[in-house]
Amino acid sequence: MTKPTRILGLDPGYGRLGYGVIEGSIALGFGVITTSKDRTVGERLAEIAADIRTILAKYQPDVVSIEALFFSKSVTTALKVAEVRGVLLLLAEEHGATVVEVKPNEVKLAMTGYGKADKKQMTEMVRTVFKLKAGPKIDDAADALAIAWTALNRRV
Amino acid sequence: MTKPTRILGLDPGYGRLGYGVIEGSIALGFGVITTSKDRTVGERLAEIAADIRTILAKYQPDVVSIEALFFSKSVTTALKVAEVRGVLLLLAEEHGATVVEVKPNEVKLAMTGYGKADKKQMTEMVRTVFKLKAGPKIDDAADALAIAWTALNRRV
């Protein structure tokens, strides 16, 4: 048997950054990295980078799946998210992982079969696929697990 | 006499990233970091990060001045530039430098006294202020030197 691919899914953001690590339909770990608005942008990026490096070292993912840029909210928000994305892309590359970029509608399609699924439906499917109990922790990390799942299914 | 503030100015971009290091009106070093479109986004960010870390180690700037986001071109371009900006902000923070963000019109105003100065006028003033000869190298790095100059004058 070949070693299963381990995938880290990342849902980028300054205030809340979701992460989820999967092997097939097993969720090995997931959670959310938060940073405070009271810190400078540089401090927040450094905090995020330190936490991501810890997660990469702990889980040693083969693949890092990151949500691609989108414009559904404000351009200002998208530009801030892009700064975080740049840092995540750098850290994934420096870790030696294969980087996969997935689009929001692709994630919804992979997880629910419907490209415009809402947050509730997404969370339900993530819980079902990974056999997880309901709770605030899964609400924060559901998108990240779905982003990892999308990369897995693209590779099959 | 107090030690003069050493400032690294950065003009972010994937394909061409200008840098310039100043102390007062002395340009200690300047140039451009280029990456190829043939490489992945992760590879390009890793190349940029390696070069920036070398520049930070060599010049040990007290302040890193980075151009803030703007939308004069396409949103897609702005989002890519934001990814690079995120990496630069992280590296400046991890180096322990004070990060200053300057706006494009502020840079033009500081360098030429006119907030809508064109590229030619900017390059001329950079050459005059820093007593530099004309040439392709200064063309690439003129904006970065102006970005550093803006941070210096804001601090006065």
Image (cartoon, coloured by chain):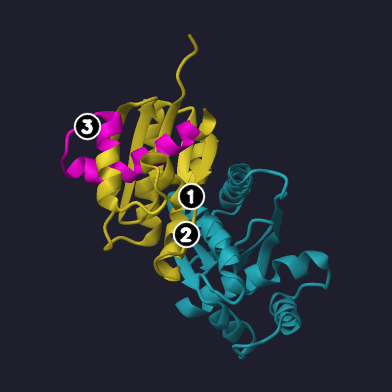
Chain colours: A cyan, B yellow
Q: What amino acid is at disc 3?
A: Leu
Asked which secondary structure carries label 1, the reply is loop
Whether the magenta-drawn stretch holds residue B150 is answered as yes
Q: Nearer the viewer, residue A115 or A60?
A: A115
Highlighted magenta segment, given as a residue range: B126-153
Chain-order first, disc 3 or disc 1: 1
Q: Is residue A72 left or right of residue B128?
A: right
Whether the magenta-drawn stretch holds residue A143 is answered as no
Callout 3 environment at 10 Å: few (<14), some (14 to 19), or many (20+)?
some
Determine whether B149 is above or below B43 in the image.
above
Q: Which residue is mark 1?
A: B103
Q: Which residue is mark 3?
A: B132
- Residue at (26% x, 63% y) in the render: B38
Q: Is residue B142 visible?
A: yes
Q: What amino acid is at disc 2?
A: Phe
Q: Nearer the viewer, residue A58 or B148?
A: B148
How far apart, in angstroms, are the residues tagged by discs 1 and 2?
8 Å
Callout 2 environment at 10 Å: few (<14), some (14 to 19), or many (20+)?
some
**Residue A12, horizontal then vertical, whole percent:** 60, 62
Chain-order first, disc 1 or disc 2: 2
Q: Quadrant of residue A108?
A: bottom right
Chain-order first, disc 3 or disc 2: 2
Q: Main secondary structure of the magenta part?
A: helix
Callout 1 environment at 10 Å: few (<14), some (14 to 19), or many (20+)?
some
Q: Nearer the viewer, residue B68 or A106?
A: B68
Asked which secondary structure carries label 3, the reply is loop
Q: Is residue A20 left or right of residue A66?
A: right
Q: Which residue is mark 2?
A: B70
